[in-house]
Amino acid sequence: MSEYKLIEEIISRSDAKTWDEAKLEWYLEEVYREDEPDTCLCDHYPINEICILRNVHNGNRAMVGNVCVKKFLGLPSDRIFQAIRRVRADEQKALNAEAIDHAHIHGWITDWEREFYFDTMRKQSLSEKQMKKRLQVNRKILQRVINTFRNRP
């Protein structure tokens, strides 16, 4: 992994010409996990936890590995992937606020589901009905994150 390659690539896709300004132009548009490894913008291979970044000024997109996003851009992708890994291992576990917020922003879950999740995510014990709803929301989000881009053009 070359941090200089990542910096160079992000600056080349930005309006700003310095790293400190350029990295502020980017936001986390999408996260997903791929079974088939890909290559990060920094040339690191293999990556399976993929982040799609979008530039707020020019609309450019960049595919970057989760490690680079966390380490160099400081976006919350690592927290989202931590929650996804936890729920993949046990679907009854709760997602974290970052994963729920990301799912809501992207329209994967409704306003009601977001509020339900925030109301129940720290509870130690859920009713049968609450657990059923949590499982439903978890599966909905997992379905979107895991191999999301496989069928996209």
Image: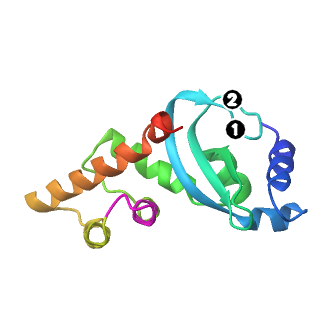
Image quarter of residue 65: top right
Residue at 84% x, 42% y is 5
Picture coordinates of residue 35, whole percent (x, y): 49, 28
Which residue corresponds to mark 1? 40
Q: Dot 1, crowdedness within 10 Å: few (<14), some or many (≥20)? A: many
Q: Quadrant of the C terminus?
A: top right
Q: Please determine whether, in this image, residue 70 is positioned above or below residue 118.
A: above
Colour mode? rainbow
Magenta residue span? 100-109
- Drawn side of residue 73 relative to residue 123, left or right: right
Left or right: 35, with 25 as reference point: left
- Quadrant placement of the N terminus: top right
Check if residue 101 falls in the magenta segment.
Answer: yes
In the image, what residue type sits under mark 1?
A: Cys
Extreme-top residue of the structure: 36
Q: Which residue is mark 2?
A: 45
Helix, strand or loop status at disc 1: loop
What mark, if any, has residue 29 been given in the picture? none
Three-letter code, disc 2: Tyr
Alpha carbon separation for disc pair 1 and 2 = 7 Å
In terms of depth relative to the viewer, which is nearer, 63 or 89? 63
State the image coordinates of residue 72 (x, y, percent, origin top left): 74, 54
CB atoms of marks 1 and 2 within 8 Å: yes
Q: Residue furthest left?
A: 128
Of the numbered discs 1 and 2, the one sitting upstream in the chain is: 1
Q: Is residue 35 above or below residue 60?
A: above
